[in-house]
Amino acid sequence: MTIKLTIRVRPGASRVRVGGVHDGALVVAVTAPAVDGRATEAALQALADALRLRRRDLRLVTGATSRTKVVELAASVADPAQLHAMITALRGAP
């Protein structure tokens, strides 16, 4: 089983932050610029850190050159219910 998550990357931020929602997508702010995939890679690493996963447990499905991306999480490495709770908390939902 895999979990797909839509994220919205904000490159060039003053600090790395995962949280909040933009058009239904989880916001991932990174300091890396949107050049040569650096912001995408930084966003995937920040998301992995926030979800306490390894970077290799995340895979970019769509949006390599877009700010809105779909990421697949390998649910086999963690409890899906726990991942869902963590994502809900990051989104800021009650």
Image (spheres, helix red, strand yellow):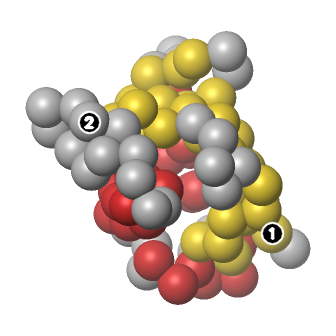
Picture quadrant where residue 31 is located: top left
Residue at image location 71% in from the left, 49% down from the top: 63
User: Residue 16, can we see it?
Assistant: no
Which circle's residue, 1 or 2, is located before the other in the chain?
A: 1
Q: Amino acid at mark 1?
A: Thr
Residue at the image point whose x is 47% and y is 61% from the top: 37
Residue located at (66% from left, 72% from top):
59
Q: What residue is shown with label 1?
A: 2
Give the quadrant of the N terminus: bottom right
Q: Position of residue 4 (x, y in %)?
A: 77, 54
As displayed, is residue 3 above or below residue 90? below
Q: Total label count?
A: 2
Q: Nearer the viewer, residue 64 or 69?
A: 64
Crowd band around label 1 with a 10 angstrom C-alpha radius: few (<14), some (14–19), many (20+): few
Determine crowd level at label 2: few under 14, some 14-19, many 20+ residues with C-alpha closer than 10 A: some
Q: Residue at x 45, y 22 (%)?
A: 20
Figure check: 54 above or below 84: below
Horizontal arrangement in the rendering, residue 87 relative to residue 59 (left or right)? left
Q: Quadrant of residue 21?
A: top right
Locate residue 24, reporting x and y percent.
Answer: 69, 20
Regarding mark 2 in the picture, which secondary structure is present there?
loop
Q: Which residue is identified by label 2? A: 12
Q: CA distance from mark 1 to mark 2?
A: 30 Å
Residue 22, horizontal then vertical, whole percent: 57, 17
| Amino acid type for the residue under numbered disc 2 | Gly
Left or right of 91, for residue 62: right
